[in-house]
Every structure is written in C-alpha cells, then in structure tokens.
Amino acid sequence: MKDTTMKTKHLTTTDGTNKSLDEVNGSVEVPKNAGFFKTLAAYTGPGILIAVGYMDPGNWITSIAGGAQYKYRLLAVILISSLIAMMLQSMAAKLGIVTGKDLAQMTREKTSKSMGFILWIIAELAIMATDIAEIIGSAIAIKLLFNIPLIVGILITTADVLILLLLMRLGFRKIEAIVATLVAVILMVFAYEVFLAEPSIGGILSGYIPTSDILTNHSMLYLSLGIIGATVMPHDLYLGSSISQTRKVDRRNRDELAKAVRFSTIDSNLQLFLAFIVNSLLLILGAALFYGTHSSLGRFVDLFNALNNSQIVGAIASPMLSMLFAVALLSSGQSSTITGTLSGQIVMEGFIRVKAPLWLQRLITRLLSVTPVLIFAIYYHGNEAKIENLLTFSQVFLSVALPFAIIPLVMFTSNKKVMGEFANHAWIKYASWLSAIVLIILNIYLILQTLGVMA
C-alpha cells in the first residue's frame, strides 16, 4: 500500500476553511477495482485508532472495579455501551467521508462564534479528562516496571509529545501499524490472564443481560456511568469524523462515496468489537480474581500485586503475570496518547479555527492535564489509590460531556440537506436520539443523587 508523506501545504474545503487534519487528509491511496479483502485492508486503520480510545487506562479502572465489586453484572453495561459506540462511530465516519468536514467543523459552521467557543471548551475538557487517565495509567506502569517514583513518572509522561512528533513524520499508515501492535499486546495479555483465572462461563453469559439494580443502586449507577464515559468517548467522535478522511476518495463519485462509507463502517465495527472484547476481559478478570474475597481491590497496583500473590489468585500467581500487566498498561497509555493529541488538534481548528503547531497544542493540553494529577500526587504523597479516584471521576465527566458531541452528530447525519442519500435510516436516527436522551437523564439523576437532592 502506498503511504504518501505528510503534506506541507494546507488543503482547503470548498468554503475556504482548512481540511480536517490537512497534513494527512487524503494521504492514503485506496484501490479502485480490487476485491473485498484487499479493499478492506486499504480502509483498515482508522478504526484501530478509534478503538484505542475505548480501551485506555480509564476503561481499565472502571471495568476492573466493576468486576471486583459487582462480579459480572456490569458486563451488560459494557455490551450496551459498545453497541452505542459502534452506531455513533459509524455515523461520525460517514459524516466526514460524505461532507469532507469533521464534526467540530460542521458544528462550528452551524452555530455562533460564542457557542463554538463554549463547545470547544467542553471538548477540550473531555480530552483533558482522557489525558488524565493516560497520565495516571502510564505513570503507575512506569513505577511498577522501573520502580520510579510516581511523581517522577507523571513528569516523564509530559515527554510523550516528542514521541508523537516523531510518529507523525513516519506517515499515517505507520502510526496505524504501531497502534495496532500495542493493541495486540493488550489483547493477548488479558486473554492469557483471564484464561488462567478460569472465570464462570455461565456467570459471564448471564452478566450480559441487564438488571434493574444498575439504575437503583447509586454506587453501581456511578460506576456504570464511568464505564459508559470510558467506553463511548466524546473526543473519539470528533476523531472518527476526521481520520475517516485520510483515505483518498473522489466525493463527486457516488459509488466511491458509498464504498468508502461501507468499508469505513466495517473497519470501525470490527475494531470496536475488539475493544468490547478487551473491556469484557478486564471486568471478567476483576470479577474472577477479586469478587467476594478482595472486592475492595481492583486498582492498578492492587491487580499488579495480586497477580504475584498466591494467597489471592492461587496457583496462577507469578512475577511474569504482574510484569505483563504493567507492560499492557504502559502500551495502553501510550497508544491512547496519539488519539488524544489528534483530537485536540481537530477540535481547536474546527471550533475556534486556530491552527497552532502540533507540538505546542500537545504540550499545552498535556501540561493542563498533568497539573491536577501532580497536585493529587503531591498532596497524597504518591498514594496511587487516591490518585486513581481522580481517574474514575474523569471517566464520569466524559459521560457528562458526551451529549454535547452526540446531539450535533445525530442532527447532521440525519439531515438529508447535509448528507443527501447517505442520511441516517429512521431506525438509526431514533436509536441514536434515544441513546442521547437516556444518557442525559442518567447523568442528571446521578448528579442529583450525588448532591443529596434525591433519596
């Protein structure tokens, strides 16, 4: 597959604005008359970058804690969240392919300058919340692997901007391949560890059936929203609408557009199914190892130590399992860094039409995200448990921010004036509106319960 180098000139849309991620926009050639699998191979890649956001350290802490506290019951939340994610991400990819604009650009075009600024702030806060999870996960992994103090590890994570700048010079297909390798490491580690843990197959299958106590139990609801926030990522909707445009497609050709939408959707769904498997494995591992015996465990350091403690996990305990866990955690944090950086560039250029150098944009976002983590680390003297509470809260914030991305996405992709024949079918439109409304209601309910307004 031909992998063109990054373009230096700025591409523009028909209305004169810069194309989304113009450094890589349309940079990957796709075959014109190839077979199914060769064509799918050409379109495969953006989906894995999207899927990374659905299996970052934020997912780890919420899924592992969910298994440790409620056994398999929250698998239903992971399943529903994953199905919603597949629907929304396919809509985001379709929006970018058909219109040639990402979600941030389209939203800014349809709103006022002041509203665009407000939505940019919300999107940036969501990216910061994701960044916090990556910082905490990477810093803890560094401490576990190299015995480096947590505060020093947090500072080290600010240097990942240099890694990203290097990757951007290699070409977009190279970035996709590197991220895919990191994801493969994560999947293999947890598949192996779950196999050793010997979970209940019947319990797993029944766990995918929703129960009413998910809504009536406040702590379960709080954790469920954390799982939703960590699974359905608002910044990934902006990212998906942009990187779907990295494939070179002639938008004047209806057949090419239809093919691009079809194969981008397949790529997205396949990779998000992989993320669903990883998140399920995380929760199953927490349930199999900790539920009923050490349900207060379930954090990164707890799991790392437990995997080497025969009194907790029995005969499967070994230093190798602990080290594999830490390697997977570091892989997750670093791969998620790439998607967070690209998302930051997309929302800044799309909402407020400010184009800053990538290194500067990345550095500012990372420093803003590092600050609260450092404050927690210093105040609690590097106490990982206290710091990971900040991580769980960040994932709940993502759930709160999600409707601000979903609502415009559903509006645009359901609008025939915007999408033409590619507008959402009726069932997709109603299902996506239902998802947005239910999520908003659950968030309001959770906030009111937290404030003590509701019994």
Image (tube, rainbow, N blue to C red):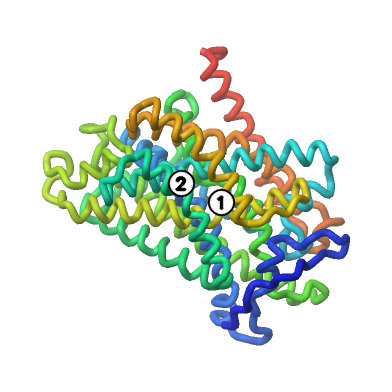
Q: Residue at x 83, y 49 (%)?
A: 109
Q: Position of residue 25 (x, y in %)?
A: 69, 68
Q: Quadrant of residue 445?
A: top right
Which label belongs to residue 340? 1
Which mark sits nearer the N-terminus, 2 or 1?
Answer: 2
Q: Nearer the viewer, residue 70 or 105?
A: 105
Left or right, 185 with reference to 431: left
From the image, which quarter does the N terminus lie in?
Answer: bottom right
Which label belongs to residue 238? none
Q: Are marks 2 and 1 in contact (CB under 8 Å)?
A: yes
Name the amino acid type tagged 1. Gly
Q: Is residue 155 visible?
A: yes
Distance of mark 2 from mark 1, alpha carbons?
Answer: 9 Å
Q: Residue at x 47, y 52 (%)?
A: 159
Name the amino acid type tagged 2. Glu
Which label belongs to residue 134? 2
Compared with residue 2, is residue 173 higher up or lower down, i.e. above or below?
above
Q: Nearer the viewer, residue 137 or 216?
A: 137
Q: Residue at x 63, y 50 (%)?
A: 361
Q: Secondary structure at mark 2?
A: helix
Q: Nearer the viewer, residue 21 or 397?
A: 21
Compared with residue 161, is residue 71 higher up or lower down, i.e. above or below?
above
Residue lying at the far bottom in this picture: please name it: 33
